Amino acid sequence: MIPAAALAVCAAASGAETPTMVRTTGEATVKAMPDTAAFQFSVVTFGADAKPASAENAKRIQSILKKLKAELPKDADVETEGYSIQPQRKYPKGGGGPGEITGYTVRNSVSVRMKGVDKVSEILGVVTEAGADQVNWIRFELDDPDELHAQALREAVTKARKSAEAIAGALGMRVLRVASVDEQGTAQPRPMMMQARAAMSESAPPMEPGEVEVRAQVTVETEVEP
């Protein structure tokens, strides 16, 4: 990929010893296969009264978590991410008024994060067969993106330096030194997201995680001389 270059050559002022500077921009994108998976599932229960609906929800969640934790790696993270009790109302045909409460909906959402992506399909199968009503999202990401970030930075700096050398050569000059390097809003790794709100099937859905990418952009200012 040819780096985008924002170039600024500052010529020496007449009669002054001001150095000639060249400013270039280098960009790089590094890709890698994800090594971590995360997903969220929900259990939704309904009842005429909030307490029985909540109790049923808790019972189902506990049953799912027991089966889920038996299959998850020991270092997996499992946490409740959302819990709500919402009244269901019936309103008069003409409208107006708060409406009559006809029942309650209880929703409990749990998120899971685990290292490794090979067993995601199997784990989702366990969750859905155990009674989850929804799998809200699935995400594939990097457990530690720092190494990929450093690689992208190295490549971006190399491209910016080569651009500076090319410009200096075209002017009949050479690069004397690097005066400054500025990192420009490095893009965070973009996780691969998958929506999964469809009706649950008996078989585990196939999962094909794509690559995760990290982008880096730097501006390098170099001093050049004849």
Image: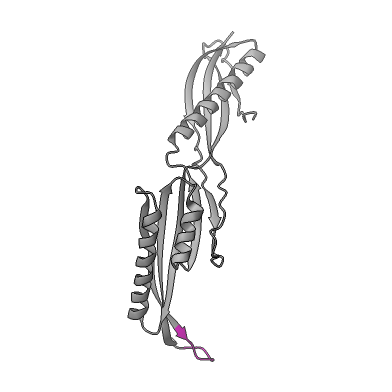
Instruction: Give the main secondary structure, helix, strand or loop, of the magenta stretch.
Output: loop
- Where is residue 83 drawn, in percent x and y? 37, 67
- The residue that appears at 38% across and 72% down in the rendered structure is 57
Specify the farthest residue to the right: 170
Q: Is residue 91 magenta?
A: yes
Q: Is residue 82 left or right of residue 18?
A: left
Position of 5 relative to 43 (above/below): above
For the N terminus, the image quarter is top right
Number of marks in picture: 0
The stretch of residues the image draws in magenta is: 89-96
The residue lying toward the viewer, choosing from 93 and 42, is 42
- Where is residue 186 drawn, in percent x and y? 50, 37
For the C terminus, the image quarter is top right
Position of 136 relative to 101 (above/below): above
Dividing the picture into quadrants, the one containing residue 63 is bottom left
The residue lying toward the viewer, choosing from 141 and 164, is 141
The residue lying toward the viewer, choosing from 37 and 172, is 37
Q: Is residue 19 left or right of residue 69?
A: right
Q: Is residue 129 magenta?
A: no
Position of 204 relative to 172 (above/below): below
Position of 184 relative to 193 (above/below): above
- The residue that appears at 35% across and 58% down in the rendered structure is 79
Residue 146 at least partly seen: yes
Residue 81 at least partly seen: no
The residue lying toward the viewer, choosing from 91 and 197, is 197
